[in-house]
Image (tube, grey):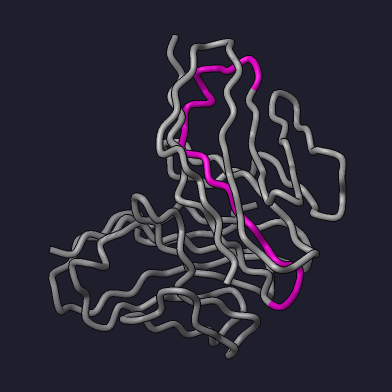
Amino acid sequence: DAGITQSPRYKITETGRQVTLMCHQTWSHSYMFWYRQDLGHGLRLIYYSAAADITDKGEVPDGYVVSRSKTENFPLTLESATRSQTSVYFCASRWQNYGYTFGSGTRLTVV
Amino acid sequence: AQTVTQSQPEMSVQEAETVTLSCTYDTSESDYYLFWYKQPPSRQMILVIRQEAYKQQNATENRFSVNFQKAAKSFSLKISDSQLGDAAMYFCAYRINQGAQKLVFGQGTRLTINP
């Protein structure tokens, strides 16, 4: 039962570069979410998806792009990375009224 | 918009003692869930306990219990007989029971256990 796999676990990138964080679930949960975790802010929702090809903005979507062509994958792309996007990124999924499952997170550093 | 506030950035407790972490939230909804998540240094998000708003009885999971005060919009977590493995970041979260049922998190409380 692998659950949610995020890759990479750590990433260092330069300002202005495009970077994609991957998220893969082994089930077929309808809902998937991307959060960023920053000290003093907890986790904040970036984007979420209700199903394949259905995505919507969360609280802090600026500078990010998502896609969901397949139910099991929900990649997050930073189109032109900025230092303010240095953070820990979590992917999560939810099925109906059951609980959430979180990935192990990706620590992204933008230099 | 719903908000969740954890006013204690850091807490510490002696091993085997009891500690209470505070959480307040703001919502106009009546049907929702509240959660406490634990995040150890491994970064994994671990569900500790959850409470359904329509249930008056406070949830309990072994050494973890909550004090849910719906009218006051308060949801504190009590950890009894604290153990070294309880050291972690704790997040309070809220979820409305409609639509995407997104989780809204508080800022987190870092709990240190002193041996």
Nearest the eye: B41 or B92: B92
Q: Is residue A60 left or right of residue A10?
A: right
Q: Residue at x 37, y 69 (%)?
A: A21
Instruction: Please determine whether, in this image, residue B35 is positioned above or below residue B86.
Output: below
Q: Residue at x 66, y 64 (%)?
A: B27
Q: Is residue A46 left or right of residue A110?
A: right
Which quarter of the figure has residue A111? bottom left
The verdict on residue A74 being magenta is: no
The span picked out in magenta is B80-99
Residue A16 at x, y percent in the picture: 15, 79
Residue B73 at x, y percent in the picture: 68, 51
Name the outermost residue toward the front. Answer: B72
Instruction: Please determine whether, in this image, residue B60 is positioned above or below residue B72.
Output: above
Residue B18 at x, y percent in the picture: 61, 18
Q: Is residue B30 left or right of residue A106?
A: right
Nearest the eye: A14 or B21: B21
